[in-house]
Image (tube, rainbow, N blue to C red):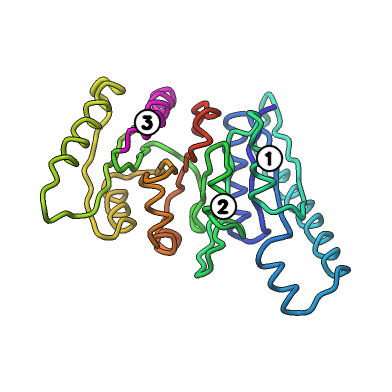
Amino acid sequence: MKKLIVLTDFSKTARNAANIALEIAINVHLDVQLVNSYLTPFAIFAAEGEGRTPFDVSLIAVASENGLKKEVKRLCKIMDSKPRGAQKTVVETISTLEPLPDIIGRLTKSNEVKLVVAGVHESTLPFIFSGMDAHQLLKGLNCPLLIVPKTFRHLVVNNLMFASNAGRSDLEIIDKLYSCSRNHNVHFCVCHVSKPVFVADFNEEDRILKFGHELSKIGRGGICLNELQGANLVKSLNRFVAARDIDMIAIAYYSHSFGWELFHENHVSKLIKNQRLPMLIFPANSWQTYHGQIG
């Protein structure tokens, strides 16, 4: 059975993300795998600061397993309140001392895992995805990652936007997303995001024109390319999102992509603080395993 993975640290943010993940799993017939790594930076710092012994660490492991059992009961209660479908979603758990990048990288190597879902913490710390640093997680991920803002409650996607810096590698993802969007009656657009320039760069203009030409071939004229400039990338995105009633943002994450700029140019804290929509991230390793499913 195909499945999705939910990263949890038992916070309200993580429970909210699990609710969204369950909604997706039911809609597209996936099983759910709840993963908690109790070797999180928070647990380590707390143990070191309080001088805990190895016995204390074992208590953390017990707390992890108990927390997962409670979360399974909660999700099953939600499922029981919904109309019965032809197939019931199975919820499994993994409690591990293994670091999240390792366990998630290993689990997603199989084509069985179609999506990883994580809640976003509004924190000044770099550990933002349920206790995990974004770069480490995305680097080894073999499937898309959906990050769910703390305030987001219900997933309905009518308008999907792909944010790009006109990189040619984005075209492969755009092709798949456009096809998927048409199958689900979702309006799809592409937004070229760039910072303001004061001196004309004709090579850049030519690159963008070629990118637009390739888009027209993919969508046969059905994909709208929007130009968006702003010194603050996150605020520029949010303004566009509000004006166009966008329900979800998609980005690619590879060297020199727009996603790379977001996560490597000190935009992470702004993104976590200001982002109000779910963001679907396609790491480079995910392109071979993605089969285009939007809940």
Q: Amino acid at mark 2?
A: Gln
Q: State the image coordinates of residue 169 (x, y, percent, origin top left).
A: 37, 33
For mark 2, give the secondary structure: helix
227 drawn magenta:
no
For mark 3, give the secondary structure: helix
Judge by depth and name the residue closer to the eye, 78 or 288: 288
What residue range appears in magenta? 167-186
Q: Earlier in the sequence, mark 3 or mark 1?
A: 1
Q: What residue is pinned by disc 3? A: 174
Is there a contact, CB below 8 Å, between mark 3 and mark 2?
A: no
Q: CA distance from mark 3 to mark 2?
A: 24 Å
Q: Which residue extends farthest bottom?
A: 50
Q: Write down the quadrant of residue 82 in the picture.
A: top right
Q: CA distance from mark 1 to mark 2?
A: 13 Å
Q: Quadrant of the N terminus?
A: top right
Q: Amino acid at mark 1?
A: Arg
172 drawn magenta:
yes
Name the mark nearer the viewer: 3 or 1: 1
What residue do we see at 56% from left, 52% from top? 136
Q: Amino acid at mark 3?
A: Ile
**Mark 3 nearby-residue class (10 Å; few <14, some 14–19, many ≥20):** many
What residue do we see at 34% from left, 43% from top? 163
Is the magenta region chiefly helix, strand or loop? Answer: helix
Q: State the image coordinates of residue 166 (x, y, percent, origin top left).
A: 28, 38
Q: State the image coordinates of residue 278 (x, y, percent, origin top left).
A: 46, 48
Q: What residue is pinned by disc 2? A: 136
Above or below: residue 165 compared with residue 89: below
Q: What residue is pinned by disc 1? A: 106
Q: Earlier in the sequence, mark 1 or mark 2?
A: 1
**Mark 1 nearby-residue class (10 Å; few <14, some 14–19, many ≥20):** few
Q: Earlier in the sequence, mark 3 or mark 2?
A: 2
Q: CA distance from mark 3 to mark 1?
A: 27 Å
